[in-house]
Image: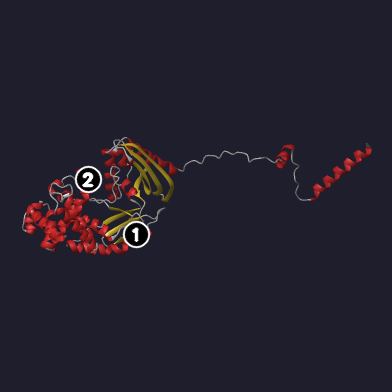
Amino acid sequence: MIRLYTLLLTLCLALIACGSEGSQTVPTPTVHEASTLFAQPTRAPRTTPSPTPLSALEFELNRTIARMERAVQTANLDTYLSFVWAGDPIFLAEHSAWARDWVEHPLAVFEMELFNIRTLSPQTAVARMSWRWRQATRSGDDSAGGTTMSVIFYRQDDRWLLGGEHWTTAEVPGFRLYYLTDVVDNSQQAQTMLDYLPEVHAAVTRAFAYTPQQTAHIKLYESPTVLFNWTRLSQPDLTSWNAPGQAIKLALTPIGTAPDESVVAREYTRFLLFELTGGARERFPWWLEEGIAEYGGSLFNTLSQRNRTFKRVAALALAPQTSDERLLRWDELTDPEALSADERDLTVRQAFVLVHYITEAHGIDARNAWIHAIARGQSLDAACQGALGLSFDELDAAWRAWLPSQL
């Protein structure tokens, strides 16, 4: 027993001596600590992450869109527009018209969501914004939809306001081009357009002997779906848009290329007509506006493309008035909404051929004098008498007599 006690005492003294040799001591683990060190759990323990609080910016932006969403759901136009930034008059005009559309065509569902929020400055923020909607009084595949777009917000007073799509812009004489570089990058397509826009400007202004004083704003969307979602939810068949006081809205082609020169020339011609009338669009019958715009676009078409249109319209001129496939009478065209898509397409083509005929038969100067007279408010018949020397009925008869020669 004495020998065992002596052995234990010697061991303890040795341990104490070893601990005193170093400058630092390692505490002896407790039983609980030792079991933790050497235990081998069969699976990792579950942990519950602590929720990350929303930043002040995220909170305020989401509060803005929650109020906008509620305003759409209750068709409260004034409340909705109180959250739209007024610093960009073109966007304000466009988005006000967009909002009036869902007042006239109520929505059963409208939901908004923000993500990828970030600041550009203390007063400016950008985000990706999605919305989803469904019409209340329509059914079918085109009665519901949605889109996602990069947007910009501006802080004004004590709240954030929607400033529209987050565009990159570039200018050439006569045009300001808006395109996407945030998430979606359309820089290459934009450059294609910037290269040919001066030629479009020169061709259209020369053809109609007028140079608009205002800059034409062109917004280039990634697809027709995004375009119509930002334009008119009640018109899902939109592929372009052009109205006085608003931007020309165009989309990339189905293969992702820039719209070609003829498309832009067509819409720039329409923009020119808007300026000639001072924004009074109703001075031109809708079909004549379409025909003149199509003529402007044809400046960049090939001769074979124009001839195909002439031949198609000329063939219909030979059909009897009782035929289902015939030229439409101008007095049938008062309401474009009453026409089928095929009838509207035919109307544009035959109005284009009429403008071409006036150019061929009476000359460019007389045609432009006719267009300018209508833009100033003269009736169609008075403009024909003054610029062309015949009534509109006589012009129509001469045009129809000329058509068979194009076959």
Secondary structure under the numbered disc 2 in the rendered image: loop
Please state the horizontal and vertical placement of residue 149, each as a whole percent of the image.
38, 48
Residue drawn at (19%, 58%), measured in percent from left and top?
A: 311
Please state the horizontal and vertical placement of residue 51, each as a whole percent of the image.
52, 39
Q: Which of marks 1 and 2 is in front?
A: 2
Residue drawn at (88%, 40%), measured in percent from left and top?
A: 8
Rendered-image quadrant of the N terminus:
top right
Q: Quadrant of residue 307?
A: bottom left
Secondary structure under the numbered disc 1 in the rendered image: helix
Task: State left or right for residue 396 relative to residue 308.
Answer: left
| Labels 1 and 2: the sequence-earlier one | 1
Q: Mark 2 points at which residue?
A: 340
Q: Residue 190 carries which label?
A: 1
Number of labels in the image equals 2
Type of amino acid under label 2: Ser
Type of amino acid under label 1: Ala
Residue nearest the viewer, comparing 100 with 302: 302
Instruction: Sort mark 2 into few (<14), some (14-19) or many (20+) by Cα contacts within 10 Å.
Output: few
Q: In which quarter of the image is residue 146?
A: top left
Q: In which quarter of the image is residue 232?
A: top left
Please state the horizontal and vertical placement of residue 207, each as a whole percent of the image.
18, 63
Q: Which mark is residue 80?
A: none
Q: Can the viewer see residue 48 in this picture?
A: yes
Instruction: Sort mark 1 into few (<14), some (14-19) or many (20+) by Cα contacts within 10 Å.
Output: many
